[in-house]
């Protein structure tokens, strides 16, 4: 998680705003479970959370679909379950093919 007191989206000190801050998921929890079969333990790990103003910045810190692919790869996840939606598996296969180290 980013330093306590600093919003990851707008880089403002939490004390400077009246909007409440929360620990926000980098990977949207619903999409992480639905499209990538990520577990709550994975999503709720403090390394995968950041600070964000609740109503103002929360959506800004969430990764989009392509960003999630990159993030998972950087986390060391190199295979996804085969039961995931076909579009997800195709996108993952293309990303993995482009990012595998040559043997």
Image (cartoon, grey):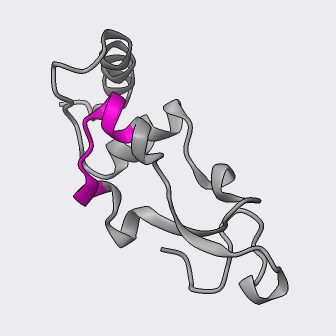
Q: Is residue 10 magenta?
A: no
Q: Determine which quarter of the picture holds residue 46.
A: bottom left
In the rendered image, residue 93, in percent from the top left (x then y), is placed at 30, 18
Asked if residue 59 is positioned above or below residue 69 in the image, the reply reads below
Q: Is residue 82 left or right of residue 64?
A: left
Question: Which residue corresponds to the image point at 52% horizontal and 39% vertical from the top-left?
Answer: 67
Q: Determine which quarter of the picture holds residue 102.
A: top left
Quadrant containing the C terminus is top left
In the rendered image, residue 31, in percent from the top left (x then y), is placed at 42, 36
Q: Is residue 20 left or right of residue 38?
A: right
Q: Nearer the viewer, residue 94 or 72?
A: 72
In the rendered image, residue 75, in percent from the top left (x then y), is placed at 31, 52
Q: Is residue 49 left or right of residue 45?
A: right
Q: Main secondary structure of the magenta part?
A: helix
In the rendered image, residue 20, in percent from the top left (x then y), is placed at 69, 75
Q: Determine which quarter of the picture holds residue 6.
A: bottom right
Asked if residue 4 is positioned above or below residue 32 in the image, the reply reads below
Q: Residue furthest bottom?
A: 15
Magenta range is 32-42
Count of numbered marks = 0
Asked if residue 90 is positioned above or below residue 60 in the image, the reply reads above
Question: Which residue corresponds to the image point at 67% horizontal and 65% vertical from the top-left?
Answer: 54
Question: Which residue corresponds to the image point at 34% horizontal and 63% vertical from the top-left?
Answer: 44
């Amino acid at each position: 998680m980013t330093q306590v007191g600093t919003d990851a989206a707008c880089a403002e000190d939490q004390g400077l705003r009246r909007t409440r801050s929360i620990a926000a998921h980098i990977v949207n929890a619903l999409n992480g479970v639905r499209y990538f079969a990520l577990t709550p333990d994975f999503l709720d790990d403090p390394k995968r959370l950041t600070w964000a103003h609740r109503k103002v910045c929360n959506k800004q810190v969430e990764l989009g679909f392509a960003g999630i692919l990159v993030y998972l790869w950087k986390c060391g996840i190199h295979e996804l379950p085969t039961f995931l939606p076909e579009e997800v598996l195709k996108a993952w296969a293309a990303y993995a093919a482009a990012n595998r180290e040559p043997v």
